[in-house]
């Protein structure tokens, strides 16, 4: 690994991108976490806590329509629990260096085929970077202010089978009622795939809805997503792009609807894989038809809200795909936090108890050159950096 020279260059670049001065990724000095190992930032109407493990968000508090502060993301009460949970559901983390699935755990760059470490479907493919992907590792806190925190990781050449060193900076910033994410990654030595995301689990009721412990009551709107990536029974893209026909179970574009609106539809069985009922789908974000746009000020690519809490989340991003997972594989073994829940109810995440909303690029695009995603997913020395930005804006409907 050509550290620290190349990593220092990457550090200078990333600092220039963000307009801030950071410590170097291998710094042994930094801010102090609270008693639970978490770092808190806040702004008007919003506060959040993060842990270095996977650069994960662990808590996000906003005030609902009744003036009650709700913690609306999944996590653990302490930072240590993130590292010891045996199921590792990627709570609030940054999966990398390549999010989502890689078919057959292989890809080819410039004629060279690489085999990365499999960790999904009995070794058939690689999920979220492999068994020791980024969200299994501790990032370094390199900046921390009242309203912002930056994490960094140096991913060495050959880790999990990926070629080349990658240096990445993850910055979370809060402003009034808003959470902003910026992820920057630089390939320093070889061409390599890079695709990141935020794997945050949401329940906008903070698990306190008196009538249901699930998120099936959450209403979802995806106004630009009339298409999705076709997949096989183990959720590997098969090369097809499918229409979300108006009125179908995957139609969230023609009108908003609740997550559970079509749960009993025969069409829903197998929608998220073999014998799976629910959602685990990569929706495409098609905005080009409207001409040039600024993702920061155009309409949100997704909106989610709950009538119970009145909390609404509008998501803006520069990414061209959006994975929606309805937590159908939760089975009541994952605990909720002390800041969540309803007295007298089991303190666990039930099936469909949450929604994962992942801004990212087209999944497994490195194995589908016909999609034309190479410039968004493969990076080398001298290239522009990989950049992901997303803004989560919260409001309350009383």
Image (cartoon, rainbow, N blue to C red):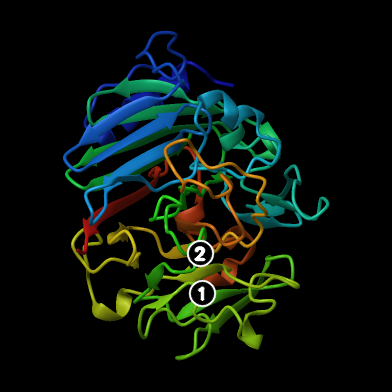
Relative image position of residue 58 (x, y in whole percent): 45, 36
**Residue at the outermost top position:** 29
At horizontal 56% and vertical 82% (from top left) the residue drawn is 242
Of labels 2 and 1, earlier in sequence is 1
Front residue of 191/391: it is 391
* Left-right relation of 33 to 353: left
Task: Say above or below: 255 vs 6.
Answer: below
* Left-right relation of 126 to 167: right
Dot 2 falls on a residue whose secondary structure is strand
Dot 1 falls on a residue whose secondary structure is loop
2 and 1 marks in contact (CB < 8 Å): no
At horizontal 43% and vertical 16% (from top left) the residue drawn is 35
Q: Is residue 348 visible?
A: yes
Which quadrant holds the C terminus? bottom left
Circle count? 2
Relative image position of residue 192 (x, y in whole percent): 57, 44
Which quadrant holds residue 134?
Answer: top right
Which quadrant holds the N terminus? top right
Task: Say above or below: 119 vs 18.
Answer: below
Instruction: Residue 260: give its label.
Output: 1
Relative image position of residue 201 (x, y in whole percent): 48, 51
Which quadrant holds residue 102?
Answer: bottom right
Which residue lies under the disc numbered 2? Answer: 324
Task: Say above or below: 345 vs 315.
Answer: above
At horizontal 24% and vertical 33% (from top left) the residue drawn is 42
């Amino acid at each position: 690994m050509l550290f620290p020279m190349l990593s220092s260059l990457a550090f200078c670049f990333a600092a220039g991108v963000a307009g801030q001065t950071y410590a170097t990724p291998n710094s042994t000095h930094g801010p102090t976490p609270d008693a639970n190992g978490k770092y808190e930032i806040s702004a008007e109407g919003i506060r959040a806590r993060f842990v270095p493990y996977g650069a994960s968000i662990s808590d996000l508090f906003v005030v609902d329509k009744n003036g009650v502060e709700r913690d609306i993301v999944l996590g653990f009460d302490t930072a240590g629990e993130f590292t010891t949970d045996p199921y590792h559901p990627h709570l609030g983390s940054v999966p990398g260096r390549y999010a989502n699935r890689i078919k057959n755990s292989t890809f080819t760059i410039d004629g060279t085929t690489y085999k990365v470490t499999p960790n999904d479907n009995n070794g058939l493919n690689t999920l979220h970077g492999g068994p020791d992907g980024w969200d299994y590792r501790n990032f370094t806190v390199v900046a921390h202010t009242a309203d912002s925190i930056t994490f960094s990781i140096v991913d060495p050449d050959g880790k999990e089978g990926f070629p080349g060193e990658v240096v990445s900076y993850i910055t979370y910033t809060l402003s009034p009622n808003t959470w902003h994410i910026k992820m920057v990654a630089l390939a320093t030595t070889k061409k390599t795939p890079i695709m990141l995301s935020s794997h945050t689990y949401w329940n906008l009721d903070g698990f306190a809805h008196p009538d249901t412990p699930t998120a099936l009551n959450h209403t979802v709107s995806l106004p630009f997503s009339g298409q999705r990536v076709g997949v096989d029974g183990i959720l590997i893209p098969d090369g097809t792009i499918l229409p979300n026909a108006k009125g179908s179970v995957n139609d969230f574009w023609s009108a908003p609807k609740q997550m559970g609106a079509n749960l009993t539809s025969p069409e829903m069985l197998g929608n998220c894989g073999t014998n799976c009922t629910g959602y685990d789908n990569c929706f495409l974000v098609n905005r080009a038809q409207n001409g040039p746009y600024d993702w920061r000020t155009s309409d949100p690519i997704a909106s989610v809200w709950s009538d119970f809490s009145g909390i609404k989340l509008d998501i803006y991003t520069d990414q061209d795909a959006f994975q929606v997972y309805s937590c159908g594989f939760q089975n009541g073994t994952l605990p909720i936090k002390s800041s969540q829940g309803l007295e007298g109810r089991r303190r666990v995440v039930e099936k469909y108890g949450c929604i994962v909303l992942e801004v990212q690029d087209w999944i497994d695009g490195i194995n589908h050159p016909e999609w034309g995603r190479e410039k968004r997913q493969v990076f080398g020395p001298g290239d522009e950096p990989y950049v992901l930005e997303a803004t989560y804006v919260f409001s309350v409907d009383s």
